[in-house]
Image (cartoon, rainbow, N blue to C red):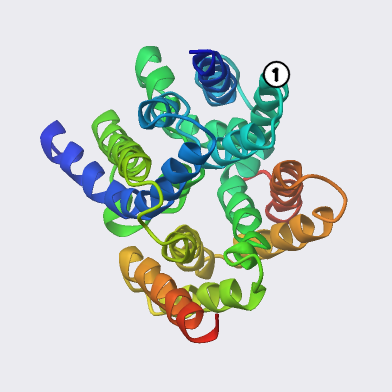
């Protein structure tokens, strides 16, 4: 039962940062540079989310994650559908794990 | 403007890759929660109420290590600071929505729903209606919650190697969204690579949750310097 307190606490502190911009963003008039900053956020965030995290897919073998990421890079350069890019990276990793581990 | 029904349907379609990517990872989470003495119901409840993969994995891992509740909640809070920045970008797209909708939909902001909403192209970038965003987010949510249920009930039956191999799927999602978008604009491509370098460098000094936040804020700041304020 005590675990419910932990879950509720985690739920609260996770929702708070998601919620704040929903309350405040409309109330301010932002300068033009802030709009540029906002538009840059997705590129910066995705860059940071991808690297070096992708190397930790298989914590013992960074090369496995690197290969999975490289497969995704190659497939996305071909403008394939996102599901195919995901499937390609998963198959690459499973294949290399099967052969090398 | 399309009718709400078809907007909802398109949102669900856009959310499917995320749900598919979440599913195996949520299975792994459900299994790990079982090891930490959480019942399958408690694991599902956590996925329903928290809906943040990284936080849930860290929370349950700390629980396994015997960490106190307050410390776990504090760790979760800091890990989620990146959602504050992501929520700014998502709410920028929801300007003009009724306040209750914005507050409700913001609950579902994750790395992945944020990435799809901000960088998605083609069929993933129709006009931003509440129906489209809701369809996308609820689909992702159901993928996460249902995966947790399967993992909680089948703890130990699914080989760990398969689920760890599948975690690369979400990196595939990120890369598959970032590359086509960055290909169209050199400044944005520079920002993405710069952010990788900053994050990698900072990773040696600060916790990864913070280095992601700092790299995002700094690299986007450099974006302002490169692009200027007029766009």
Which residue occupies the foreground of this view, B231 or A38? Answer: A38
Q: Residues within 10 Å of mark 1 (few under 14, many from 20)?
A: few
Q: Extreme right residue here?
A: B205
The chain that hosts pointer 1 is B
Relative to B99, residue A48 above or below: below
Relative to A52, residue B210 above or below: above
> Which quadrant of the structure image shows residue A83?
bottom left
**Residue at the spot x=69%, y=31% of the render?**
B66
Which residue is labeled 1 in the image?
B70
Which residue occupies the foreground of this view, B33 or A16? Answer: B33
**Residue at the spot x=83%, y=46% of the render?**
B206
Which residue occupies the foreground of this view, B110 or B156? Answer: B156
Report if residue B98 is visible in the image. Answer: no
Relative to A97, residue B29 above or below: above
Mark 1 residue element: helix
**Residue at the spot x=70%, y=61% of the render?**
B196
Query: Does B175 sit left or right of B101 as displayed?
Result: right
Q: How many marks?
A: 1
**Residue at the spot x=46%, y=65% of the render?**
B172
Relative to A60, residue B22 above or below: above
**Image position, residue B205 (x, y; %):** 88, 50
**Image position, residue B120 (x, y; %):** 39, 54
Specify the quadrant that holds the N terminus of chain B: top left
**Image position, residue A98 (x, y; %):** 46, 81
Q: Extreme bottom residue here?
A: A99
**Image position, residue B187 (x, y; %):** 64, 62
């Amino acid at each position: 039962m005590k675990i419910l307190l932990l879950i509720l606490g985690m739920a609260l502190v996770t929702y708070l940062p998601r919620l704040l911009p929903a309350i405040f963003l409309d109330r301010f008039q932002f300068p033009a540079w802030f709009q540029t900053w906002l538009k840059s956020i997705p590129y910066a965030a995705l860059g940071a989310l991808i690297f070096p995290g992708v190397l930790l897919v298989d914590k013992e073998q960074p090369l496995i994650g690197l290969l999975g990421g490289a497969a995704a890079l190659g497939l996305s350069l071909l403008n394939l559908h996102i599901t195919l890019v995901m499937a390609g990276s998963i198959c690459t990793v499973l294949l290399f794990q099967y052969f090398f581990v | 403007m399309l009718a709400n029904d078809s907007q909802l349907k398109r949102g669900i379609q856009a959310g499917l890759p995320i749900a598919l990517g979440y599913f195996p990872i949520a299975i792994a989470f459900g299994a790990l929660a079982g090891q930490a003495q959480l019942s399958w119901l408690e694991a599902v409840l956590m996925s329903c109420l928290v809906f943040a993969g990284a936080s849930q994995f860290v929370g349950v891992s700390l629980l396994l290590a015997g960490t106190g509740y307050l410390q776990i909640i504090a760790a979760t809070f800091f890990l989620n600071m990146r959602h504050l920045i992501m929520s700014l970008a998502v709410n920028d797209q929801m300007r003009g929505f009724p306040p209750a909708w914005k507050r409700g939909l913001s609950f579902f902001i994750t790395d992945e729903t944020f990435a799809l909403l901000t960088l998605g192209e083609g069929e993933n970038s129709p006009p931003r209606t509440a129906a489209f965003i809701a369809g996308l987010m609820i689909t992702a949510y159901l993928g996460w919650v249902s995966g947790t249920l399967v993992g909680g009930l089948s703890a130990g039956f699914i080989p760990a190697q398969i689920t760890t191999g599948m975690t690369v799927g979400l990196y595939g999602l990120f890369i598959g969204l970032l590359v086509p978008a960055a290909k169209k604009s050199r400044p944005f491509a520079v920002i993405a690579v710069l952010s990788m370098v900053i994050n990698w460098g900072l990773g040696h000094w600060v916790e990864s949750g913070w280095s992601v936040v700092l790299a995002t804020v700094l690299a986007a700041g450099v974006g302002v310097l490169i692009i200027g304020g007029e766009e």
